[in-house]
Amino acid sequence: MNEIITEEILSLNSRVNVEKFEDSKILVTGASGMLGSYFANSLTSLLQLNGKRPAKMLLTSRNGNFSNIRNRSNENFSYYSGHFNQLLLEDGFEFVFHAASPASPTQYTDPDAIMEANLIPLRKIADTQTVLREIFFISAGETYGNGLSEQSGGETREFQDVPESRRHYPLAKLAAEDSIRNIAEEKDCASRIIKLFHCFGPGVRENDGRSFADFIWAVARGGVPRMKSAGDDLRSFLYLEDVMAGLLVESENEINLEFNLGSREMISISDFARKVMQVGNVHGEPVRDYDNSYIQSPHKKITPNCEWLYSQGWAEMVSLDDAILRTLKSIKLSADF
């Protein structure tokens, strides 16, 4: 385990309690992605660090690229690659971490595929599982629709000003949220619907399609970020350690939780590109590479309201500079440059 990962696990260990996952059986969908793999990797390390019996995880992925999973030969991991419809899902899962879904606007071309990725696993879970204790679902800030540009926390969910090609993703997430609520009631289990805003960290893929990922990979390769817009939209970016701490935040008062998770520190897209260059020691200026086929976001400013999380004792611990540095180092350690 390299120095970056060790430091991060030790920090996370001071922020979360993973005791309930000891010797459990966990289904992780979207396990090849940035968030699903980080959950599996960090939870496994945290259990080991605390001397707990390991969890047995079924890691699923449509594309089957599990390169983000550390120690892939771990006997407590099993893998499924392919369409979830074809998976013979056995009973006995106590926890579900559902992160399977296209996440980049470049992947929004097939609305049926987006809906299926979010809903089919939940239908199969509802049909097969009898001992569920808790379901974690990664939803998105985009579900606030036109209210996304305000202090998002439960405002309007109208989508008339959102380009049609960008509606499929939030509508699929909203449908899955309804399914989660029904499953939690039917199975009498806990649930967490996490409306996640922009985040990044180890495991972010090259050619991801989202601007922040493309910027980081360009700089990791010693190049200059290329922007497909003017870059004046304001966004916030949360590092995966802080995401994990938010996902697992302890709450004594509720078993069915729905909350926002994101950073409150705003930065423009162009300034983020410059920040990545600064941290990565790449000189010059981002290149503006306008592409008429690129569908711009309708939101000039996205500001997540995370007051509930703050009230539970959660806080952002990783600075933007450190988050970028850790991510660049993780790419260089794993990529064949």
Image (cartoon, helix red, strand yellow):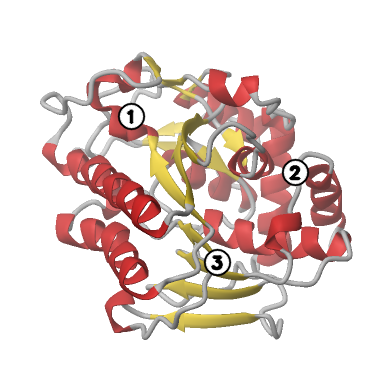
The answer to whether any part of residue 222 appears in the image is yes
**Which residue does the image show at 39% across and 52% down from the upper left?**
184
**Quarter of the view holding residue 26:** bottom right
Tell me the residue at 36%/83% (across/down).
Answer: 87
Q: Which residue is mark 3?
A: 94
Q: Is residue 19 above or below residue 17?
A: below
Instruction: Name the secondary structure under disc 2.
Output: loop
**As drawn, which residue projects farthest toward the top?**
150
The residue under label 1 is 229
User: In the image, what residue type sits under mark 3?
Assistant: Glu
Residue at the image point whose x is 34% and y is 21% from the top: 154
Query: Which amino acid is tagged 2?
Result: Val
Indicate which disc, 2 or 1, sits on the residue closer to the N terminus. Answer: 2
Q: CA distance from mark 2 to mark 3?
A: 19 Å
The residue to which callout 2 is attached is: 16
Residue density around tag 3, few if under 14, some if 14–19, many if 20 or more, within 10 Å: some
Q: Nearer the viewer, mark 3 or mark 1?
A: 3
In the rendered view, does 124 fall on the left or right side of 259? left
Q: Percent from the top left, x then y, of residue 12?
A: 78, 45
